[in-house]
Image (cartoon, rainbow, N blue to C red):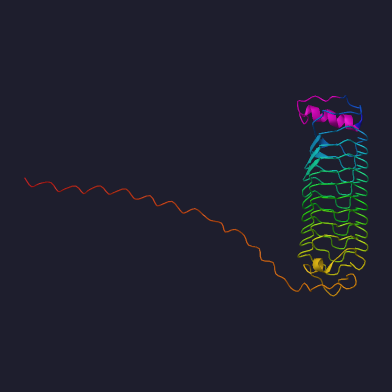
Amino acid sequence: MTRFGLALSLFILTGAVTATPAQAMIGEKDIARLVSFGGACAKCDLTGRRLTNARFAGANFAGASLVNADLRGATFLQSSFQGARLTNADLRGAEIIASNFTGADFANASLDGVEAPGASFVRANLTRVTARGAEMPGVNLSYAILTAARFTGAELVGARLTHVDGRDADFADAELSGALLVSGRFDRASFRGADMDGALLSGATFTGADFRGASLDGANLAGANLTGARNLRQDQVDGACGDEKTRLPAGLKIKACGNRRMIIVRDAIVHPPAPPAIPAPPKPPKASPPAPK
């Protein structure tokens, strides 16, 4: 029996698969109604399998091959897919929660509409990926390859894009407020209409990048190289700040960031008043002395 067959058999025996029966037998291409995976299936070969709406909960699929797999609507919950191969896979509408895709290969995959808050794609290969309208707040894409990726209209609030290769990537109309684009390469990338308020662009390069209509209010451009950026206007730069290492297109100027302190205001914890003390019971009356005879 193959490793995948053995692992799936274990899942069935331990009740990890729900009562809904699998439509296909082990070894067949389609597993359309298989609902849940758990346990370990490292380096499993699931190439080309149909896994629509599958649920991976607490599963270890590190190094697995899901090339050309149909994972539309799948759920990945607290699972590890480190180093997995998902090239050309279809993950449209998938939900990724607290799962690890470090070093995974998603080249040419479709992630349109994916919900992946806080997911880890560190050092992942997302070359030519489409992630239009994806909801990925707080996602970690550090050191990832995003060459020619399409994040049009994606929600990337607070995302980590440090040291990424984002050349020719499309972030048009994306929400990048508070994102970290530190030391990334974004040559010829599109940020048309993107919300980059409060983003940190320190040390990143944007040669040929398009900033038409982008919002940069509160953005930090210290050390960023925007010399060859296109469609960047003075009114956009006015809302940002930089330093002596900031490079802008000819004719544009930027104010110094200076020393800014962040004050975090936390809601005061209101404790309910203590209940009133329980009154002591009244003392019994003293007995009267006996009358004289």
- With respect to residue 44, does 169 lie above or below? below
* Residue 222 in which image quadrant: bottom right
Residue 55 in the figure: left or right of residue 166: left
Residue 235 in the figure: left or right of residue 109: left
Q: Which quarter of the figure is the C terminus placed in?
A: top left
Q: As rendered, which of 241 and 48 lies closer to the eye?
A: 241
> Is 230 in the magenta?
no
- With respect to residue 18, does 119 lie above or below? below
Total numbered circles: 0
Residue, far left: 293
Q: As rendered, which of 196 and 292 lies closer to the eye?
A: 196
* Residue 24 in which image quadrant: top right
The residue located at (32%, 48%) in the rendering is 281
Residue, far bottom: 244
The residue located at (88%, 42%) in the rendering is 110
The residue located at (66%, 66%) in the rendering is 263
Residue 260 is situated, as x and y percent measured from the top left of the image, at 72, 71
Residue stretch in magenta: 3-23
Q: Which quarter of the figure is the N terminus placed in?
A: top right
